[in-house]
Image (cartoon, rainbow, N blue to C red):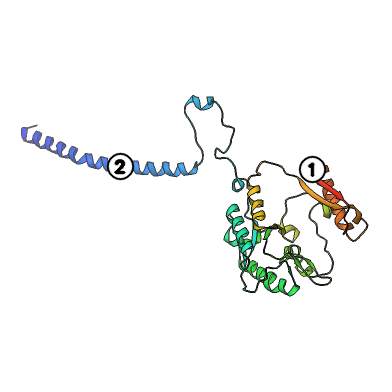
Amino acid sequence: MDRRRSSLLLTFIFVLSSLGTPFLDGLTQDSSEHTFTEQAALSELFAGFSSEDEADFWNQTPWSSRAQPEGFDFLTVYDYSDVGILINNNSEASKTIGWTFVNARNISDENIFFFNDSDTPTKETINRNEFDVYFAGPFLEMLSNRSSVTELNYLVSTKGIPLRINGGNDKASFDQEFSLLGGTYNSSIGSDYWIDHGYGPLAGSGMKAFSRDIYGFFLVTRLTGYTVETALGLIEKANNSLGQRGLFALDLATNRNDSGYKFWNDDLYTTEAELNGSMGLPTMFSTKLRNS
């Protein structure tokens, strides 16, 4: 090879080498970015998990006694997605208690039921027309306009929501009538006698998880007290009760065993036998005479 060809070959090799570096760097950079993206995607799949390569991981002293280092709370243990809250916007007590419960239990907007009419009563006793116009009607309309409420099983009423519906033979507990709205027993609202259902020991069934789809009504409970502070205290006490077991308090009047109260007394006897006897849960069963 003559000197001219040798010089041209060396020049070509030099130029190629100088061009190849950024070209290869680009390939390396693209490859690194692709690898990083894959690794990031894989990392997301294992969010919340960790591993240790060191043998000391298995020799920790003391070993952690908690599966969740920050501890458990109501929102990590209990699912409130099937719970709805009733709030009377004419009642400061209802709004205070209701919103406290919403924030404490992370209740979704779909499961908050506001009663907004300016004439919505806040008194403890209402008549049948007030129940229909200001509470039953608006609630049924809200139910029909919300998609997620088909999963609701439980409703929570508050202080500021009426306690009772007056009248003759159709007088009733507000919460009991409300539990029937939109379900299997809707047509029984306002009737002058009780209805039979199939849930729980009082109906001759076992203790099972409740489902409105199966049994046809809501279970309704209430956050109330003589004062707003008492009702708010119930929420706070529940916050601090995780992992503890309280007493079931049952109050029965033995001198009414042969009166019109007999049916309710029989239910209390059955409840005591089921909770304390069959299930071994602690109860305080008060059997005292009542003067009235």
Question: Which residue sits at x=60%, y=60%?
Answer: 96
Asked if residue 259 is positioned above or below residue 76 in the image, the reply reads below
Question: Which residue sits at x=67%, y=54%?
Answer: 230
Q: Quadrant of residue 242?
A: top right
Q: What amino acid is at disc 1?
A: Met
Q: Looking at the rendering, in which quadrant would you find the C terminus?
A: bottom right
Question: Which residue sits at x=51%, y=38%?
Answer: 49
Residue 95 visible in the shown view? yes
Look at the numbered disc 1 and give the secondary structure of its residue.
loop
Residue on which the image places disc 1: 279
Alpha carbon distance from label 1 to label 2: 66 Å
Residue 42: x and y in percent read 46, 42
Mark 1 and mark 2 lie on one chain; the one further toward the N terminus is: 2
Asked if residue 143 is positioned above or below residue 28 in the image, the reply reads below
Look at the numbered disc 2 and give the secondary structure of its residue.
helix
Residue 72: x and y in percent read 59, 42
Residue 95: x and y in percent read 61, 62
Q: Quadrant of residue 258?
A: bottom right
- In the depicted view, which residue is nearer to us: 5 or 176? 176
- Is 218 placed left or right of 44 in the picture? right
- Is 65 placed left or right of 14 in the picture? right
Numbered disc in front, either 1 or 2: 1
Q: On residue 29, which mark appears?
A: 2
Question: Which residue sits at x=59%, y=52%?
Answer: 104
Q: What amino acid is at disc 2?
A: Gln
The total of numbered circles placed on residues is: 2
Asked if residue 203 is positioned above or below residue 20 in the image, the reply reads below
Question: Dots 1 and 2: beta carbons under 8 Å?
Answer: no
Q: On residue 211, which mark appears?
A: none
Q: Quadrant of residue 27?
A: top left
Residue 78 visible in the shown view? no
Q: Looking at the rendering, in which quadrant would you find the N terminus?
A: top left
